[in-house]
Amino acid sequence: MREEAELVFTAAPRGNRSYWVISVKRLLRKKLGLACLSIILLMYGAGILSPLVTPYDYNDQNLAEAKQGPSFGHPFGTDRLGRDILTRIIYGLRTTVIITVITLITGSLVLGISMGLVAGYFGKIYDTIIMRVGEVTSAFPEIFLVLIFIATIKPPITDWVRGIEDTLGIDIVKLGVADYLVLSLALAIFSWFGMARLVRGQVLQARENQYVEAARAIGVTSPSILFRHVLPNIMGPIIVLVSAGLAGVAGSEVFLSFLGIGVQPPTPSLGLMIFENASISVLRTNPHLLLFPVGTLTLLLFTFNLLGDAVNDAFNPRAR
Amino acid sequence: MGPYIVRRLIWLPVILLIVSFITFALGRFGPGDPVEVLMGQHSNPEVVERIREQRGLNDNVFVQYGRYLWNVSHGDFGESFKYRGRTVGELLKKKMWVSAQLNIAALIISVGLGVPVGLFAAMKQGTGWDTLAVAITLVGQSVPIFLTAPGLLLVFALKLDVLPTHGWGGFFSPQLVLPAIAMGVPGIAIIARLTRASTLDVVSQDYVRTARAKGLPESMVRNRHILRNSLIPVVTTLGFSLASLAFTSFIVERFFGIPGVGNLLIESVFSRDFPVINAIVLIGTTLFVMANLLVDLMYPFMDPRIRMGASQVA
C-alpha cells in the first residue's frame, strides 16, 4: 500500500523543453501506455461529468425493478433498491476522482514537494525535523492511523461544513463534502513523505549544479532558485512518483470505505458497493451486484499500474 | 551495526508511546465519553461525578495516561461499549487467534509457492516457462483482493462445489483453503518475482562461478551459494508483506464470513465501539512496528556484508 522504493535518477536532463517533448512522445508511442491513458481519461471524464452522462440519479429508487440483471435500460442491472448500477458506478468513479486528485495535490504535490524542497535546500535542522517526522509517520501502518484520525476529526469537520452550508444556503453536506475532505486530508497526511524524500534527494543533487551556484552568485533569492531552477529540473521523477501513487490512493479510498470509515452512504463509492454485496448469498443469487463494481475497480487499478510503468519508462532517463 | 540497532531500538518505544498516547487521548477525549456511554441518556450529574471519581477520571491527565499504559501492558483494554460487561481483551483474544491462523496459512502459501516458482523461472531463464511465470506473476500482483476473493468463491465454491464457502473451522479445515489462497495470491506473485530477480543477480556473481570452477557439485552450488543469497531480499519483504496481509485479511474475512479481527473491526466501526477500535489500532501498530524491526535485525545474520557496510557508514 505504500511505495517504499526510493527512485534514483541521474543528473537532471538539459534542455527542458526537448526533455518534455521527448518524454511525452515516448509515452504516446507506447501502445499500452496510450491505451491505459485513454481508459483512465474515459473513466475520469465519466466521473467528472457524472450528472451529465447518466440518465438516472444515483439515488433514484424503483423497487418494482429491484435486483434486475443487465438489460438495455440498465446495462449493469439494478441493485436491491432498484437503483441503476452503472449510474452508481459512474458516481463512485466521481468519488475516486475527487479523492485521488485532492489527495495527490495536497499531500504529494503541495506538502510533499515543499517539505522536500525545504529539507533538501536548507538542510541542517529543517532537514532533520522533516525527515524524522516523516520517518515516524511512515513507521505506522497508515490505515490504522487514518482510522483514528478520521474518528477524531470527522465530527468537527462535519460541523464546520454544516456551518458553511448555513451561511451559503446551499445543500453541500448531502454531496458528501465532509467525507471527501476528511478522507483526502487523512490520506494526504500519511502520503506526503514518499514525495518529500524523493524531492529532497533530487534537490541535494540539483543543488550542486553550476547553474544553481551561478544563480546564487548573481543574487537570486532562495525561493526563486527553488522554483525557477531546481523544481523544473526534477519534474520528471515527480511525475513518475505521482503516477505510481495513483493506484495506491484509489485503493486506499476503496479499502477505507469498505471498512466503513471512508465515504458514507448514500454517497456512492466503489468500496461501499463492494462492501454491501460482499457475501456468498449475493454471489449465488445476484452476482452482477458485486461483479460490476469489482470489475470496474480491477480495470481502474490495472490501468493505473500499467500507466505508472509506462510513465516510468518514458520519463526516467535511466530506463531508456 | 551497533549504533544502527541501538537507534532502531530507541525508536521503538518512542513510536509505541506516540501511538498509545493517541489511542488513550481518543478514548478519553474523543467521541463517546466512557461515562456518558455507560449511563445512557438518563444520566444523573451526581452519579456521573461519583463514577468519574471511582474510575479516576478526575485525576491528572498524565496519571491517567500512566494508568492506561499499565493496564494496556497487562492486556486490560477496558470494557466494550457494545457488548456490555465483556472486556475488550476477551473479545479480541479469540478473534486474534483466528486472524493469526489465517495470516499464517496465507504466508505459508505465499512463501511455499512463491519461492519455488521464482527459482524455477530463474533456472529456466529465457525459455517459454520463464515468460509464462513472469506473465502470471505480473497479473497476480496487480489483481485486487476484491476480485480474487469473489472469483475463487464463484469458481471453486459455487460452480465446482468442491470447497466450503463460509465460516471457520480451525487451521486444518477445508474452510481455510479458499480465503488463505485469496490472501496469498499477491504474496505468491511478489515473492516469485523477487526470488527470480535476486536469483538471476546471484547466479551471475563471481563466487558462483568460482564455486562451479572448484568443481563443487551442482546441488551444493545451488543450495549453499545461490539459494542462501538470493533469499535475503525475500526475507526483508516478509515483514512488509505480513503487514499488507493483515489488511487484506480484513477484506477476506468479510467475504468468507470468518469471525476474525477484521470483521470485529468493521462491526466496531459501525457501532462506534471505541474501546475495541482503540485496542485493535494499538495492538496492530505494535505488531507492525515489531515485525519491521525484527526483519531489520535479521538482515545482518543473513548477510554479513551488511554488518560491515553499516559500521563503516556509522
Image (spheres, grey):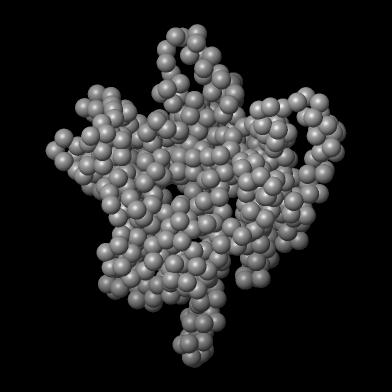
Residue A259 to residue B301: above or below: above
Using the rendered view, name the quadrant where residue B242 is placed: bottom right
Residue B6 to residue A262: above or below: below
Side of B51 where A198 appears, left or right: left
Number of disc labels:
0
* x then y, percent, for residue B229: 54, 73
Task: Give the residue displayed 52% in from the left and 63% down from the top.
Answer: B102
* x then y, percent, for residue A170: 42, 12
Side of B171 where B301 appears, left or right: right
Task: Give the residue displayed 56% in from the left and 29% down from the top.
Answer: A154
Foreground residue among B63 and A105:
B63
Task: Give the residue displayed 38% in from the left and 57% down from the top.
Answer: B149
Task: Give the residue displayed 62% in from the left and 71% down from the top.
Answer: B302
Side of B261 where B209 appears, left or right: left
Residue A154 seen in render: yes
Side of B212 where A147 appears, left or right: right
* x then y, percent, for residue B184: 45, 63
* x then y, percent, for residue A172: 43, 18
Foreground residue among B272 and A200:
B272
